[in-house]
Amino acid sequence: MLPKSGEVAIGVPQTPQQAASYRVESTSSSSPAARPEMDGWVYFARRAEEAGIDSVLVALNRYEPDPLVVSCALGRATKQLKFIAAYRSGLMQPTTFVQQVNTLSGLIEGRIDLNIVAGSSKLEQHGYGDFLSHDERYARAEEFLAVCNAFWRSNGEVDFEGKYYRVEQGKLNTPFLAPDRTAPEIYISGHSEASEQLACSQGTCWLRVAETPEKLQPVAARVRARGIRICLRLGLICRPTREEAVRAAEALLPKDREENTTRLKDDSQMYKEGAAVASDAYWLSPFLWAGLVPHYGPVWTTLLGSPQELADAFIAYKQIGVSEFIISGWPEDDEVEIFGQKVLPLIREAERKHPC
Amino acid sequence: MLPKGGEVAMKTAQETNRVLTTRSTSPAALPDMEGWVKFARCAEESGIESVLLSFSRYEPDTILIACAVGRATRKLKFIVAYRMGLMQPTTFVQQINTLSGLIGGRVALNIVAGSSTAEQHGYGDFLEHDERYARAEEFLGICRSLWSRDGEVDFEGKYCRVERAKLNTPFIAPDRDAPEIYVSGHSEQAQRLALTRGSSWLRLIDGPEKLAPLVSRFRDQGIEVSLRLCVICRPTHEEAVRAGVAMLPDEEIGKQERDILSKSDSQTLKQALAAADDVGWLNRNLWAGLVPYYGSSAMTLLGSPQGLAEIFLEYKRIGITQFIISGWPKLDEMLIFGREVLPLIRRAEAPSKEAANVRRLKRIGKSTGVT
């Protein structure tokens, strides 16, 4: 995950708590997240390249700069890293979207992929001029991508008449330019039935939040059977031991909540028990924790542990057919370095010993 | 005018014609950073202020090109052509604002209501010419509200609707909080749109006496007028004319060109073609002869350096402030313009040192040198 603008503090040590509070405040219009800031991004992108990271996800929302334009600037300043630009259908005509993505591919050696999101909160979509309901947004995304894929697959003119889009003799001279393919990868994210369907019909990869391998196994098998890859989003906290990782994770819980809990603990046995049950339920497995989710959102479902434990966890996912991971950390740049130095070599070693 | 992909390497005018550059095998379809950066740096050295990036289905997207070339330059501004009906206004503003923050605010807009009906249908736009202007009015209304950063934007029109629209990323520039908006087109609707939503009306060059009354109408309402034209500058007028005639394409290509152009429903192009057919020469220096083959912006001013400098000054006197210039080849003609013509104009603008400070304010063009 590409850090937000201004999130990377070059040369200044940043605690996970500072990174977290930056995130929480990033939707305020006074946050540096609103203004493109190349130095931090380039610094991060180069560390990611050094760490052996293949791609970064660039988010789209009304609080931050546009991901296609950001990918263009950043792609021009890097050599290997790929950019997965998030975009929503309903923001532009598919022909225009393809023209932009193709142009971008030609400017950054094809290092562009897409994360198509059907929509976001109603409020935010209304600001973008989109007034469809959740289910309709998926129907529209289906049409949107059908038109896009028609452009990428055909050399001739594109004709399409659907409920949401209509294109007649659509033609773009600028092709998708990449050394190894003729269209971008399309990651479809979401947990709903509709998103899984969309991933299978128009996407190349289904992107969802991490769950335990046991729970994911049947879903993964189903999606893989249709030729679609699986990518997981997760937060990562790697420390020398699991205990240290857990402490680091718990330190990210908002302070006032901790204080409340402590205060209430003295008064209420019932609350104490309730809190205990809730916290237990947050542990999806010994290494997968959802405790940050209520505070930072579902993508902060966090894998934590020692380097060896994490490497084992990634391999377990690989064994059930997950082939990609979009990882976030606190702060992003430190965790990317830890991952590259400590975890990735163990994974590669395990792969060499037991090739799947 | 920024050259098309591959154009900087082309040696003859004929290679740059529309029949060839709209073929899907043309290098015009591919981003050409090497050629563009070379051209952009030469433009900066030639004293050119801005370049126009043209939008069509035959070429790469203008916003992304402006981003890539803008990151590789320091001073040059990019006038990004875009059409209405291609994206939501909120998304458009988000992209433009992002771009502004990445290239030091060096972005302006050239808003075109639409182009040929066939091309618009390929983009999913099925409105008629007049309706396209009505939509552009709404579209730019929302854009302007978002740029004014005065809280959330609500708008409900016939073509565009947004509710509580808000973008955290502002337009970022040292001297302004919204881009300049050039509205192009000759139709009555285009003129009205320029007056209500634009900062400059962009039109084809015509004789100064014909333009004078139109120009005052805009200037009176605080809107600038910019002209599009081509320039052929040679040591003498005769040599310039010979060079112009040598740029006519062979007959077969000429026919195909004419065929492409006749499909456009642009008022501008219709008028320019009529001028080419009727008279050819609008005056001693202004020639429409290349329009049928290179498009409406091929209305060409030709002459010697001194002759051209005087003509530019004449346009300045009637109130024209900016010129968007093309040539064949673009790079060579720009270098000639910067070396031979521009110094004569600047010298005429500031004849004495004492007057220089006052006159500097009145120099042609915040940019004579839009190209």
Image (tube, coloured by chain):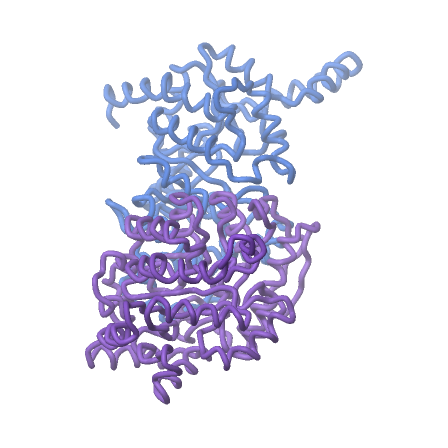
Q: Residue at x 35, y 83 (%)?
A: B281
Q: Whole-percent x and y of residue A334?
A: 46, 21
Q: Whole-percent x and y of residue A9?
A: 52, 25
Q: Which chain is purple?
A: B
The answer to whether residue A150 shows anywhere in this view is no
Q: Which residue is drawn at 23% across and 56% down?
A: B9
Q: Viewer-proximal residue, B277 or A39?
A: B277
Q: Residue at x 52, y 59 (%)?
A: B363
Residue A163 in the figure: left or right of residue A258: left
The answer to whether residue B79 shows anywhere in this view is yes
Quadrant of the image containing the C terminus of chain A: top left
Vertical relation: B148 (above or below) A266:
below
Q: Viewer-proximal residue, A26 or A217?
A: A26
Q: Whole-percent x and y of residue B58?
A: 33, 64
Q: Whole-percent x and y of residue A223?
A: 38, 43
In the rendered image, the residue lying farthest to the right is A267
Q: The blue chain is which one?
A: A
Residue B49 in the figure: left or right of residue B261: right
Q: Quadrant of residue B242?
A: bottom left
Vertical relation: B131 (above or below) B141:
below
Residue B65 in the figure: left or right of residue B224: left
Vertical relation: B211 (above or below) A90:
below
